[in-house]
């Protein structure tokens, strides 16, 4: 049967809409918009807040879990010292030339081709499954004796998160993470949300760092001091859901996460054309932030500028909320970042893979240095 363009568009929209999980419109959500300050809203009100760029944790599933700010018994692990100088320069400098921006481009072309990566949509699940396949291929190709990749299945929504664990000789855990979902304002379930920069760029960049990290002979042999994990979080755009679930579990299990680096949007140079990192200084660990500045100076070719992003602005906040030191290095200072995010125009043409490569250099330095740091 032949369709007119209008009928074809309506049919396509209907088919995509039918692939979104049904939701109870009367369900209420508890959002934390500041430490200890919550509001209860409908789902429509929740998304209206997001469209207005109001950051929040959706704590509906964890409203009975105390935060660090409200718990006198739980202390932030920030007392563990970060390196004051680089100690693995020879190893890191040998790995950096192996980083391949063409790999990032190839992966991002496919990842951003999914209609959207909305956490309740069929393509939100399919895109995560595709990414899992790419991650598994990297881990398998490395031949690492104990590295493993697993899904994290969440109870309240279908899109999974993904974790790669590279065990060390102790349980101290160094984490690098990026969210894998995408969203647009308005028609979230049916709308086209390529999310090339937000956050396809971060997702494929840390995948490339994983590949290069595992290629190191010392790493590949299983000789690692600290445990290293690479995380890809589902449902970040809906209130940091995937990362909250993971770090809340880690806190319950008394996991010793000594550091978490968040990489959310790494592919845009800036509206002013001046290339530099945005080093987020609010709701992050000050000692880790100081360490990240040293990593940037040692291993990248561009400067940094301090910036702020507000409460619960991305997944590092979930680590911080559960007592784990975290940092967030953004593509630019806030306000200078990619203007196309959360629209159908967040596409490959607006991504600079040279800039993403600078983030990859930084992330490689971050993870390798801390993989062998005694934190003592």
Image (spheres, rainbow, N blue to C red):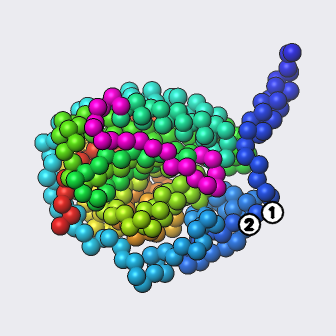
- Residue 288 is situated, as x and y percent measured from the top left of the image, at 30, 63
Quarter location, residue 172: bottom left
Q: Quadrant of the N terminus?
A: top right
Quarter location, residue 13: top right
Q: Main secondary structure of the magenta part?
A: loop
Secondary structure under tag 1 reads loop
Q: Please state the extent of the stretch shown in magenta in the rendering.
A: 140-159
On residue 28, which mark appears? 2
Quarter location, residue 72: bottom left
Q: Quadrant of the C terminus?
A: bottom left
Vertically, is 333 above or below 9?
Answer: below
Residue sitting at 73 percent across and 66 percent down? 28
Q: Nearer the viewer, residue 262 or 20?
A: 20
Vertically, is 294 above or below 76?
Answer: above
On residue 191, which mark appears? none
Magenta highlight on residue 144: yes
């Amino acid at each position: 049967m032949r369709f007119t363009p209008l009928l074809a568009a309506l049919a396509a929209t209907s088919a995509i809409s039918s692939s979104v999980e049904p939701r109870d419109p009367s369900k209420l959500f508890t959002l934390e918009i500041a430490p200890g300050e919550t509001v209860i809203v409908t789902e429509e009100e929740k998304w209206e807040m997001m469209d207005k760029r109001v950051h929040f944790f959706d704590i509906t599933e964890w409203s009975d879990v105390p935060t660090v700010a409200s718990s006198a018994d739980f202390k932030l692990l920030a007392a563990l010292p970060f390196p004051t100088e680089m100690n693995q320069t020879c190893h890191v400098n040998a790995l950096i030339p192996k980083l391949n921006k063409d790999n990032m481009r190839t992966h991002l072309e496919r990842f951003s081709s999914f209609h959207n990566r909305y956490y309740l949509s069929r393509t939100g699940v399919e895109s995560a499954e595709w990414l899992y396949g790419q991650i598994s291929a990297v881990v398998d190709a490395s031949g690492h004796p104990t590295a493993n990749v697993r899904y994290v299945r969440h109870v309240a929504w279908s899109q999974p998160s993904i974790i790669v664990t590279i065990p060390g000789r102790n349980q101290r855990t160094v984490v690098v993470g990026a969210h894998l979902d995408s969203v647009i304002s308005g028609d979230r379930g049916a709308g086209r949300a390529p999310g090339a920069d937000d956050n396809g760029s971060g997702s494929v960049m840390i995948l490339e760092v994983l590949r290069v990290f595992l290629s190191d002979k010392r790493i590949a042999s299983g000789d690692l001091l600290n445990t290293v994990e690479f995380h890809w979080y589902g449902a970040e755009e809906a209130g940091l859901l995937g990362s909250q679930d993971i770090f809340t579990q880690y806190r319950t299990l008394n996991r010793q996460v000594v550091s978490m680096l968040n990489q959310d949007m790494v592919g845009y140079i800036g509206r002013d054309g001046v290339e530099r990192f945005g080093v987020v200084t609010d709701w992050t660990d000050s000692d880790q932030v100081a360490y990240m500045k040293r990593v940037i100076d040692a291993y990248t070719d561009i400067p940094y500028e301090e910036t702020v992003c507000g409460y619960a602005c991305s997944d590092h906040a979930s680590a911080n909320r559960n007592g784990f030191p975290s940092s967030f290095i953004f593509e630019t200072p806030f306000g200078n970042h990619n203007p196309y995010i959360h629209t159908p125009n967040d596409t490959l043409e607006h991504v600079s893979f040279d800039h993403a490569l600078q983030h990859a250099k930084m992330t490689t330095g971050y993870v390798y240095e801390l993989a062998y740091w005694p934190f003592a």
